[in-house]
Amino acid sequence: MSVELLVETKGLTKRYGSRVIAVDDLDMAIRRGEVYGFLGPNGAGKTTTLRMLLGLIRPTSGTARVLGQAPGSSASLARVGSLVESPAFYPYLSGRDNLRVVARYAGVDSARIAAALDQVELTGRAGDKFKTYSLGMKQRLGVAAALVKDPELLILDEPTNGLDPSGMADMRSLIRRLGQGERTVLLSSHLLGEVQQICDRAGVIASGKLVAEGTVQELRGEIGLLVRAEPIEQARQQIERILGAEHVHLLDGALRLDTDPDQAAAINRYLIEAGVEVSELRPQERSLEEVFLQLTEGGETS
């Protein structure tokens, strides 16, 4: 069965002058109905990519299609809501009146405002001036502005930036709710936990290049084995004989083995017969942090 792509880029590149490559030959595909995490360190090219998808800046080369249309076209923007960097509103207008301004510019019926405020749980403070809002409330009003059009695609650029832990948890909960059903969410983030908790799939960008793409489980890779034993060096030498040194890693006083967990019983028996005392032997998956650091290690940000 074919999968409908709401965002597709091929060879998307953005250069500034002859030396700075902000986005480098980017191929990315985002499906309808998923929450897609665009994960990378600060300065990796995430915001530049989002700006190209919204038609705010032109690519140097390559192509992009958003909802089957050219980025920035009226047909595309009518079905896209976005929050890129910090939201800017009139400080002396209320949250509701700021959304009225947004709706007027977008050509949207003002009846959508109440629903947008309700979705971000700001109805009770909608009549208060924007300048009185906390940072978390300002971020949520920015999301409400993106929702006024009831978009098919919602693009959020680092929406938890600057929030305290409580505000971050509230924003993540909101994004999970917004990503249900047919709506597609493209979430840019440098926070591993955020992507792991919220997203169906993720793309990892480093130095402007997409270095990996898949589900969180796919990115984390195969399950291995964790072994704690004494003496640890003897255990390491014994296991290297059967698996090879390249498949045995010493981490925090334990051995990480790149092998099928089904081999646990055989490895345990082998170590015991060699006089090694095994205190722990269990399956272990790579953390997303391990994968992220491996994929982005040594990359210069742009």
Image (cartoon, helix red, strand yellow):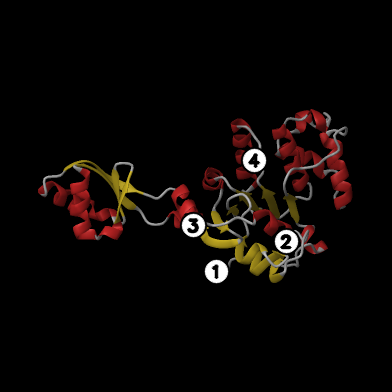
First in sequence: mark 4 vs mark 1: 1
- Circle 2 packing at 10 Å, graded few (<14), some (14-19), many (20+), is many
Q: Are marks 4 and 2 in contact (CB under 8 Å)?
A: no
Say which label, 4 or 2, has the lower sequence index.
2
**Spatial separation of the CA atoms under disc 2 and disc 3:** 24 Å
> What amino acid is found at the position of numbered circle 2 in the picture?
Met
The residue at 87%/34% (across/down) is: 93
Disc 1: which residue: 1
**Circle 2/circle 3 CB separation < 8 Å:** no
Q: How far is disc 1 from disc 2 in space, using C-alphas?
A: 30 Å
Amino acid carrying mark 4 in the image: Thr
How far apart are the alpha carbons under marks 4 and 1? 36 Å
Residue of label 2: 52
Query: What SS does tag 3 mark?
Result: helix
Q: Is residue 220 above or below residue 126?
A: below
The residue closer to the viewer here, 195 or 16, is 16
Judge depth for marks 2 and 3 and give the one in front.
Answer: 3
Viewer-nearest of discs 4 and 1: 4
Residue, disc 4: 160
Name the amino acid type tagged 3. Answer: Leu
Q: Nearer the viewer, mark 3 or mark 4?
A: 3
Q: Are marks 3 and 1 in contact (CB under 8 Å)?
A: no
Which amino acid type is shown beneath numbered disc 1? Met
Label 4 sits on a secondary structure element that is loop
Instruction: Give how far across and how far down residue 68 sits, in percent.
Output: 71, 67
